[in-house]
Amino acid sequence: MNIANASREAARASGEIPARDAALSSPMKGESRLDLSILIPVYNEAESLPDLAERLVQALEEFSQSWEILLVNDGSTDSSGRILDKLAAADRRFKVIHLRRNFGQTAALMAALDHSCGNVLVMMDSDLQNDPADIARLVRKLEEGYDVVSGWRKDRRDAAVGRNWASRVANRLISRLTEVHLHDYGCTLKAYRRWTIENVRLYGEMHRYIPIYASWQGARVGEMVVAHRPRLHGKSKYGFSRTPRVMLDLLVIFFLDRAVDRPMQFFGSVGLYAFFGAFLVGGWALWLRFGEGTSFIQTPLPLLVCLLVISGLLCLFFGVIAEMLMRTYFESRGQRAYLVGRTLNVD
């Protein structure tokens, strides 16, 4: 690892060790804004971290901008924590946050975001499949007028062909439902201007949908092909078990996009469709009864009518309850249902 011994000795002499305590203090306090922050969640990547640190320093030292690297230890059970402490002790630009247990990638990225100082934020993985050399290209793409630039692993080097196919289907579905068209929502390597996500709070597996949140804030979202390397150490933390969670989070995104400020219209529409379906099915049942002499008890249609009517009523009730909750949410926070870009001659 090519981190200078002089930095390590200086850190020891100045009493900055243990590094864990220094890294846990928030850099937001009393520290000026930097140009660039690299946000990296870490979970059991001890074998990859030394190479990652070296490649990051090599790529970032070519910048004329100021930078920092925030590494969040998401409850690793290997020696990742000790290696991160050594990195922080050797170079103050490496800032380490140790979470008390494994909270997941989204929570780790939020911890890094909350402790970051950069005007531009770049998120990436710690497994060396993302190339640190792409960071400069992402930042240059931002300077073309974009607010968010998402990486696209056009030539993916994952072993599971089936997983790549499922990812392509999911990306097309997400793009269609949200109208934010990206080829690779699952790529962690993305660059953001700070204002686009500074007030975003994410849960579950929502980190992959950050460009959608940014788009809601009026951000201009772009995309760029990035390198994707084979995994050299350890094993992937992703698998088919995550697919249901991703799809459920997509359902939440779809609702937030279409109905967060007007839930009655969303639930009410579903309820009205249910009533319309009940009307059609009921008409069919009546036609069978009086047109062909088929008794009601010989078909499941009357039961289906009852289910559709009950479903419609429940949707209307849900809509009323959701409307009351959302009004309470907006009014209790003093939050407006709009965002102002700029004004002219307005105080």
Image (cartoon, helix red, strand yellow):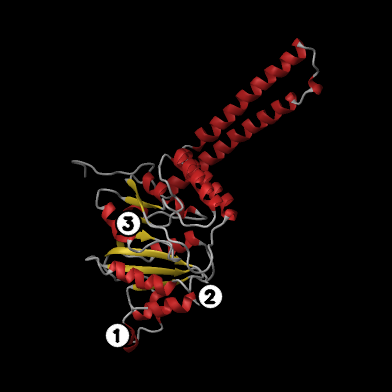
Q: Residues within 10 Å of mark 2 (few under 14, many from 20)?
A: few
Q: Position of residue 269 (x, y in %)?
A: 54, 30
* Residue at 68% across, 17% down: 283
Nearest the camera: 295 or 241? 241
Give the numbered dot on residue 6: 1
Q: Distance between the residues labelled 3 and 2?
A: 32 Å
Helix, strand or loop under label 3:
helix
Give the numbered dot on residue 168: none
Screen quadrant of the C terminus: top left
| Upstream in sequence: badge 1 or badge 2 | 1
Nearest the camera: 276 or 2? 2
Residue 195 lies in quadrant: bottom left
Q: Name the residue under label 2.
A: 78
Helix, strand or loop under label 2:
loop
Q: Name the residue under label 3.
A: 194
Q: Nearer the viewer, mark 3 or mark 2?
A: 2
Question: Three-letter amino acid code at disc 1?
Answer: Ala
| Upstream in sequence: badge 3 or badge 1 | 1
Screen quadrant of the N terminus: bottom left
Q: Residues within 10 Å of mark 3 (few under 14, many from 20)?
A: many
Helix, strand or loop under label 1:
helix
Asked if residue 58 shows in the view, the reply is yes
Rendered position, 192 above or below 24: above
Q: How far apart are marks 1 and 2 (CA)?
A: 28 Å
Question: Three-letter amino acid code at disc 2?
Answer: Asp
Q: Which residue lies furthest to the top in this view?
A: 291
Rendered position, 170 above or below 15: above
Left or right: residue 284 compared with residue 17: right
